[in-house]
Amino acid sequence: MDSLTAKRLRAIDQWSCMSNLFALYRVFYCGPRLYPRPRAPYDQRPSPQMIKRVKKLRLRSNLKKSLLAAACILGLAACAGHPTSSKIQGLPERVELNGVPAFRGDTYLGGPAALASMLSQQGIVITPGLLDKPLRLPGGEADLERNMQALAREYGMLVYPLDAKLTALLAQVAAGYPVMLRITEGSTLWAEPRYAVLVGFNQQNSTVVLRVARDRRRAVAFSDFASAWKSAGQWAVLVQRPSQLPANLDAERWQQAANATAQAGQEQAAAQALKVMAERPKQP
């Protein structure tokens, strides 16, 4: 009996060991599955607010791309149509007056150089340096516009003002007359007026040709020239001999120019200008 009891006790003891091992296995291997760790932030499902924000950003980005593409298409269309749309009816395709002397100089806002070009084109022997004193330079830059016109009249010329239109300027150049004008040069940080002479244009390229500063021949786009001319007050004049009637003559304006020349002491030149106007062929 004692030996049978001992066998049973040994069997129970062995079973206890197996139970303990099974318990340890559950603790070390099954525990992590029964009690998982919290997910990392990058593993978590995005919140509804986050999803809504991402959709909004994508929509905004797509809208910007669409607007940019539309702007590019419109820009290309505008560039492609620019040469034909800028053609001015009734004017030649291209004109350039090569007989206008060029004086390089950017001193005193280029006024003496521009006026010397205009007077030399009329056959007067002059240089910019010879005009400094009559124009009261240096020191008279603020009155340069008025002084240049007064000095031109003293040489027996008529100063004929032009309309503030690009077509009015180009029509005079097409007729063979250079135009003295004022533009603005520089940038938004620094800009100043500059006197120049318009001597040509090219409708195919939509450019004008200027004698300005140190440039004997500067090609400027129609739009850039119009902007620079407008910012400087759109001042433009012809310096004409009494026998030279401007294109598209305004009789009243020509008479006023003749009167101003007479007041400068050139009564004979003024009388000749009025006579030429009176004898011009009548327009049908």
Image: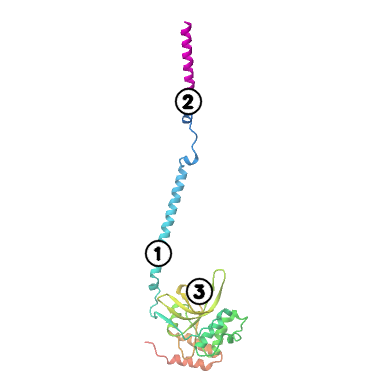
User: In the displayed image of the protein, which residue is found farthest to the bottom?
Assistant: 268
- The disc labelled 3 sits on which kind of residue? Ala
Q: Residue furthest front?
A: 3
At x 49% / y 24%, what residue is drawn?
A: 24
Q: Nearer the viewer, residue 30 or 199?
A: 30
Residue 232 appears anywhere in the view: no
Residue beneath the point at 40% across and 68% down: 78
Residue 13 lies within the magenta run: yes
Of the 4 image quadrants, the one containing the C terminus is bottom left
Callout 1: SS: helix
Camera sees residue 209:
yes
Kindly identify which residue carries mark 3.
228
Nearest the camera: 84 or 166? 84
C-alpha distance separating marks 3 and 2: 90 Å
Spot occupied by residue 137 in the image (x, y as percentages of width and height): 61, 82
Q: Point out residue 169 in the picture as x, y percentages from the top left corner.
A: 46, 80
Residue type, label 1: Leu
Q: Position of residue 226 (x, y in %)?
A: 47, 74
Q: Amino acid at mark 2?
A: Tyr
Nearest the camera: 79 or 236? 79
Q: Which residues are magenta?
A: 1-25
Q: CA distance from mark 1 to mark 2?
A: 74 Å
Q: Label 1 belongs to which residue?
A: 74
Q: Secondary structure at mark 2?
A: helix
How many other residues sit within 10 Å of disc 3, few (<14), some (14-19) or many (≥20)?
Answer: some
Give the residue pinned by disc 2.
25
- Discs 1/2, front: 2
Contact? badges 1 and 3 (CB < 8 Å): no
The dominant secondary structure in magenta is helix
Q: Tell me the element at label 3.
A: helix
x 44%, y 76%: residue:
207
